[in-house]
Amino acid sequence: MKLRQRLVFTMVCFLALQYPGGILALDAETTGQKAKEPVQREQIIVIGKVSEDPKKQYKTLKPIADYAASKMKDLGIVKSEVLFAKNNAMMINYLTQGKIDWVTETPFSAMDFVEKSGAQILVRRWKKGVAEYHTVFFSRKDNPIASFKDLRGKAIAFEDPGSTSSFLLPAATLIQHGFRLIELATPREKQPEDMIGYVFSKNEVNAPAWIHKKIVDAGAFSNLDWEDSERTLEVMKKDMHIFARSVSVPRSLELVRKNLPQPIKDRLK
């Protein structure tokens, strides 16, 4: 037996031992069995999410998508899928191309999806029993920051560029009050005296730690994160205070792609 034939034969035998179901499926055509009809895109409801931790989010989203699909059999839906995007730009592309039917998002990102992909807001979503939330601005008690004007010439920590409560909303609030913001390369970089410098902490836990260690002067994230003892440790919170807050916004919104068939929109709602 030639080397190539031996390698192929060995691999087939290995697969047959490891994945007998897969080998049977591959052999269906040769045994005269009828192949299963492929599921068409229009028979699938696809829920999407912008996430840096797809494994964690999948456990929450897949049961929701499965439930929705089970209620749409008479509309031709036979299964559900979950598709993750790394950032808002990728999600906008997915919505525009029709790869995602339905997505849950916070208000600022949701409006970005509406403007750039034509997505439609379906309903407001309560998340973990909460209908609305807001941003809190906080600093150390021994730091003389009592209002927004005291932030000029200082550095504030936001979470990440896509966060509603820990970047978009607080940044918009500061700009609305007439302040100029500049992104810093590192928390240690010096900002102009007439501007407010900002850095991204990457997660909710880092911002309080940076403030507690006096790496930055202030932080901004949601009141829910402030109240969460796992994200804002009590040992740090006792040394900090809230000096301002933003307006309240919906906790979350449900959106659908612009050309999703109306019967599916109605059923999903």
Image (tube, rainbow, N blue to C red):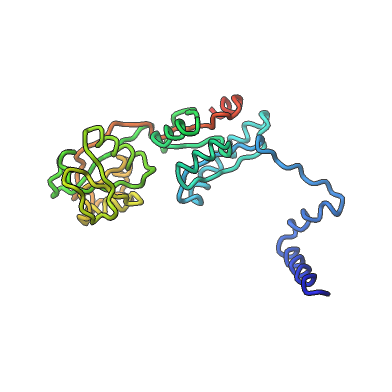
Q: Looking at this rendering, what residue extends furthest in the right direction?
A: 32
The N terminus: image quadrant: bottom right
- Name the quadrant containing residue 77: top right
Rendered position, 263 above or below 150:
above
The spot of residue 10 in percent (x, y) is 76, 70
- Name the quadrant containing residue 62: top right
Left-right relation of 236 to 67: left
Identify the residue shown where x is 20% and y is 55%: 214
Q: Say which of 57 and 259 sits in front.
A: 259
The spot of residue 94 in percent (x, y) is 54, 40
Q: Say which of 188 and 103 sits in front.
A: 188
Identify the residue shown where x is 58% and y is 34%: 68
| Count of numbered tags | 0
Identify the residue shown where x is 61% and y is 27%: 261
The spot of residue 76 in percent (x, y) is 68, 31
Identify the residue shown where x is 78% and y is 74%: 3
The spot of residue 187 in percent (x, y) is 26, 54
Rendered position, 47 above or below 59:
above
